[in-house]
């Protein structure tokens, strides 16, 4: 049986970039796939010897395609015994508006007002988003960051079990839409107010030493670690394939970075596949 990744999402959320990252990671990618042809494409690939390939079918709204038609095709592929994961790329409406304004492209939904077209598309795609195995928020990611996120999630999948991503972020830049669990570490002492530490990030040892050197940090990490020790097996038992844990501080440069790195190290020491990503560390 084949491993299929069906990727779709909001127009302007980065499908082309994600598709290129999948191709670089070794996936057999078919871009701009009409949803109504998903099943037929899978059958054709199997018939031509691609049964063992990891196949990514990227579905868009080009040519008036109805993305919601992908759901019955996903169900049919699963009924045939294939491993199928549905990935939905999303971003806040205001960011999608800016992206369309920057490229001067017309929205696939048509009309003269991009903001209204986005609202209409979101309404149509709500059932698809609700069924997604992975929701990837691209709103605050540049092209390189999106490629890294896609590669982290789908590049090397040899490790068994649920894949866990620990993401650091800054509240002033917005919550990550794809986070399953969010922990607020803004109560911890802030290196930003120490002049010698301000230019550094949580990836630098002086900032790590400062943040981890406080008793409240160690207590907080211990509580989060204990909580996840019980939650992760429960999520996996329920069939969840991906879990995103987000650690947030004010700017996403110091405290959340340190805690994300430390938490990922603790989780990784117990065996599950864990990646770490710092969304706002370079802001």
Image: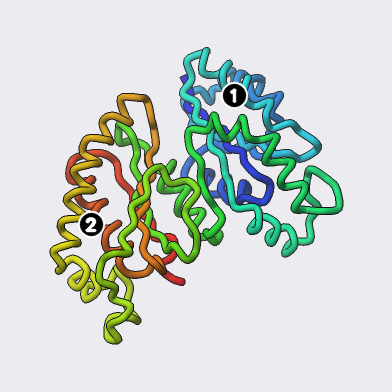
The residue depicted at 25 percent of the width and 71 percent of the height is: 189
Q: What percent of the width, then of the height, locates residue 253?
A: 37, 69
Which one is in front, 146 or 46? 146
How was the colour assigned to the protein in this rendering?
Answer: rainbow
Label 2 secondary element? helix
Closer to the eye: label 1 or 2: 2
Residue 261 in sight in this render = yes
| Mark 1 vs mark 2, CA separation in Å | 43 Å
Say whether residue 171 is left or right of residue 138. left
The residue depicted at 74 percent of the width and 31 percent of the height is: 66
Say whether residue 110 is left or right of residue 126. right
Q: Quadrant of residue 88?
A: top right
Q: What percent of the width, then of the height, locates residue 277?
A: 38, 56
Which one is in front, 193 or 87? 193
Q: How many marks?
A: 2
Q: Quadrant of residue 72?
A: top right
Callout 2: 10 Å neighbours few (<14), some, many (20+)?
some
Residue 55 in sight in this render = no
Q: Which residue is mark 2?
A: 262
Q: What percent of the width, then of the height, locates residue 43?
A: 61, 18
Q: Residue furthest right?
A: 112
Q: On residue 129, which mark appears?
A: none
25 over 213 or under it: above or below: above
Q: Are marks 1 and 2 in contact (CB under 8 Å)?
A: no
């Amino acid at each position: 049986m084949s491993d299929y990744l069906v990727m779709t999402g909001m127009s302007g959320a980065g499908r082309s970039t994600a598709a290129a990252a999948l191709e670089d990671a070794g996936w057999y990618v078919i871009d701009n796939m009409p949803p109504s042809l998903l099943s037929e494409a899978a059958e054709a690939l199997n018939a031509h010897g691609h049964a063992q390939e990891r196949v990514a079918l990227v579905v868009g709204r080009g040519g008036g395609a109805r993305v919601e038609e992908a759901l019955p095709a996903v169900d049919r592929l699963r009924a045939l015994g294939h491993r199928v994961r549905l990935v939905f790329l999303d971003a806040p409406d205001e960011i999608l508006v800016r992206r369309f304004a920057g490229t001067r492209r017309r929205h696939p939904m048509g009309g003269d007002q991009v903001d209204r077209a986005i609202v209409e598309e979101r309404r149509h795609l709500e059932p698809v988003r609700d069924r997604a195995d992975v929701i990837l928020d691209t709103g605050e990611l540049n092209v390189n960051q999106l490629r890294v996120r896609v590669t982290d999630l789908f590049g090397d999948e040899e490790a068994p079990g649920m894949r866990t991503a620990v993401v650091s972020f800054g509240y002033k830049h917005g919550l990550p839409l794809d986070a399953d669990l969010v922990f607020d570490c803004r109560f911890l002492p802030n290196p930003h107010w120490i002049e010698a530490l301000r230019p550094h990030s949580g990836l630098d040892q002086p900032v790590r030493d400062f943040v981890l050197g406080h008793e409240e940090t160690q207590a907080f990490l211990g509580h989060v670690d204990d909580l996840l020790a019980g939650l992760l097996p429960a999520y996996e038992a329920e069939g969840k394939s991906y879990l995103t844990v987000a650690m947030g501080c004010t700017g996403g440069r110091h405290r959340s970075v340190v805690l994300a790195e430390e938490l990922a190290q603790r989780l990784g020491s117990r065996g599950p596949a864990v990646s770490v990503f710092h969304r706002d560390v370079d802001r």
